[in-house]
Amino acid sequence: MSLTLLDPLAALLLVLRRVEGLVLGCVVLATDAVANWYANYLLDPAEGITAGRIGQGLIAALAVALIVAAPRVAPWLHEAPRSP
């Protein structure tokens, strides 16, 4: 439920070029990956590879990529937008 509020908030903050949007995006993706891991590996009795586990792996990979890229992206958010 909180993703319906936090995802658009992170997007809005990024559009406004705020570092807080980048941080919030990292937090949202990381917590989503952890919640999906919990649901797919601890609550789901299925064995082996499932669609949910593949999706969880993709979300986890995106979360790691964003967290790794965030320090390089953050300075760009502080720059003034260039006019065409």
Image (tube, helix red, strand yellow):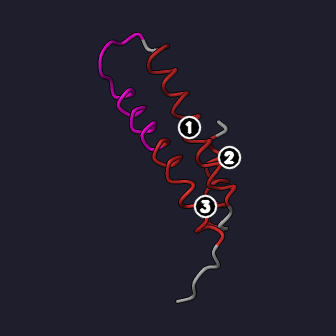
Callout 3 amino acid: Ala
What secondary structure prevails in the magenta region?
helix
Tell me residue 12's x, y (percent). 65, 61
Query: Are dots 3 and 2 in contact, CB under 8 Å?
Result: no
Q: Name the residue beneath numbered marker 2.
A: 5
Tell me residue 30's x, y (percent). 56, 37
Q: Secondary structure at mark 1?
A: helix
Q: Secondary structure at mark 3?
A: helix
Q: Nearer the viewer, residue 73 or 50?
A: 73
Callout 1 amino acid: Ala
Q: Which residues are magenta?
A: 45-62
Q: Residue at x 68, y 63 (%)?
A: 18
- What's the mark number on residue 30? 1
- What's the mark number on residue 22? none
Callout 2 amino acid: Leu
Q: CA distance from mark 3 to mark 2?
A: 22 Å
Q: Name the residue beneath numbered marker 3.
A: 74
